[in-house]
Image (cartoon, helix red, strand yellow):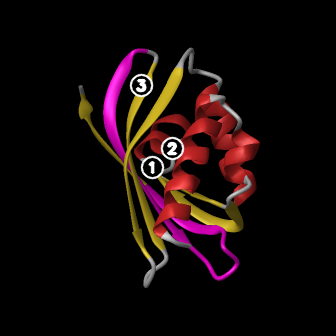
Amino acid sequence: MTHDEARAFAAEWAAAWNELAVERVLAHFDENVSFTSPTALAVVGVGTIHGKQSMREYWNKAIGHVGSLKFVVDRVLWDADSQELAIIYLSETDGRKRRVSENLTFGQNGLVVSAEVFHGVDG
C-alpha cells in the first residue's frame, strides 16, 4: 500500500461508517481479526473481539444504539515496513465529539488482521 492508497482506504472507511454500512467496513477485515476497543467493552462486555463474525455482531449491536454518526478523517499515518495504518479522526456520535485513533495492522492477504481503537476525551 502506498501513502495515497492509505489515504483512499481511510476515506472509504469513513464513508462506509458514515453510511452505517457495516458490511462495507468488514470487507477490509480478515476472518480471524482481533479488534480491541473501549466501546466493545461497554457494548458487549469484552475489550477485545476475536473473529470477523463476532465483530459483525458487535458493530451491528453498537450501531443499533446510535442515532447519528459522522467520522471526519484528520490524518492518515502509514508505515509500510510494519504494514500499520493509523486513521486519526473526529468522531461525532449523537452529538458527542471526540478525537479517535484507529490503528490497523494488515496481513499478507491485504486485509486487517488486528486493530486497536484509542478514544480521546469529549470535545
Specify the quadrant of the image occupied by residue 11: top right
Q: CA distance from mark 1 to mark 2?
A: 5 Å
When the figure is inspected, residue 92 is found, relative to residue 116, above or below; the finding is: above
| Residue 9 x, y percent position in the rendering | 58, 55
Q: Is residue 119 left or right of residue 111?
A: left
The amino acid sitting under disc 1 is: Ser
Q: Residues within 10 Å of mark 1 (few under 14, many from 20)?
A: some
The disc at residue 37 is 1
Secondary element under disc 3, as helix, strand or loop, is strand
The amino acid type of the residue labelled 2 equals Ala
Of labels 1 and 3, earlier in sequence is 1
Compared across the picture, whether 19 is left or right of 48 comes to right
Magenta residues span: 95-116
Q: Nearer the viewer, residue 18 or 40?
A: 18
Q: Is residue 58 left or right of residue 93?
A: right
- Contact (Cβ within 8 Å) of mark 1 with mark 2: yes
